[in-house]
Amino acid sequence: MTQTEVRAARADDKESVLAFCSHTWDWGDYIDRVWDDWLLDTQGKLFVSVSDEQPTGVAHLRMVTPLDAWLEGLRVDPNYRKQGIATALNRAMLVEAMQRGATHARLVTESVNSGALHIMNTLRMRPIGAFAPFHAAPIAISPQGRARVATYQPERTCLATLEDLDEIIAYINSSNIFPAVGGMYYSSFVAHVITAALLEQQIAARQVYLLRRWERLDGLALAEPREDHQGKRLSVGYIDGLTIEAISLIAHDLRSRLPDMKLESAYVYAPDLVLVRDGLAGIGYEWEEKLFYTYERGLE
């Protein structure tokens, strides 16, 4: 087995790293777009593994908050896989996270990535939730249609205000969906703990949508506009509802908002529950036939 060293990345590692990352997926990879930012990230750290005097792996530690570390972007040169490099990179990130005062480290991996799942056990990380990506195109509604919606569908979602915060927190605390995603909000495949502070921030940014029916809160969604390699999308990082119908109503309403927001699609980090999947599929959202697990390890 080749001897491997894990160290902080350097600017001159870039060409070698991007070369073995260029075919990660059919469309390539995103490492080339984030390398410079990650290399200069003082709130995190970019690592490379070196074998035979050349970079053979890369990974980035992101500090989502002073207490929450996120492990991302782990890639290993196909010519050097199954040599313990991924485990070594993950261990280096965990040590760095502890040195920075983090109390928890988390990451996301695809359900079919057997190698990564094995490493999770080795690192004593535990699964805390799962999500299935769904997407849908915009729904165009005429001005006449909007009038009919306003008249006959008073359950259309509305933007939350800070006055709704206590009610939202009470709703989430009693939700059956909230634990299924580990209490996380997802943005660009990074999990953020849903706290009162995060909700306040999202409300202030006009990114929390509420569904009210029968004089009660019946569902909600946290969604933000994002732009990535797949275009301009409304990223729905958390969705919740008491019934399939509630999920469908929220998701349909978000699709109808896309034209006004000048967005090309809606992308949902859907909790891996039949209620949510059926609610989305029933109104035209398509499952991408992938499932992702979120793992966590306490560092105290």
Image (cartoon, rainbow, N blue to C red):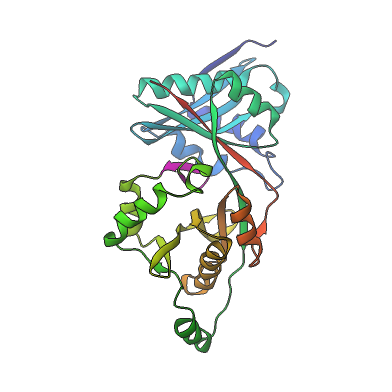
Q: Position of residue 262 (x, y in %)?
A: 50, 70
Residue at (63% x, 16% y) in the render: 51
Q: Is residue 149 above or below residue 288?
A: below
User: Is 72 placed left or right of 24 in the picture?
Assistant: left
Residue 86 appears in the picture as rendered: no
Quarter of the figure that contains the N terminus? top right
Q: Is residue 185 magenta?
A: yes
Residue most extreme to the bottom: 144
Secondary structure predominantly adopted by residues drawn in magenta: strand
User: Is 131 placed left or right of 37 in the picture?
Assistant: right
Q: Nearer the viewer, residue 94 or 280?
A: 280
Q: Nearer the viewer, residue 47 or 96?
A: 96
Q: Is residue 220 above or below residue 42?
A: below
User: Is 260 placed left or right of 169 in the picture?
Assistant: right
User: Is 228 placed left or right of 40 in the picture?
Assistant: right
Q: Position of residue 227 (x, y in %)?
A: 51, 57
Q: Quadrant of residue 104?
A: top left
Question: Bounds of the magenta span?
Answer: 184-193
Q: Quadrant of residue 96?
A: top left
Residue 164 appears in the picture as rendered: yes
Quarter of the figure that contains the C terminus? top left
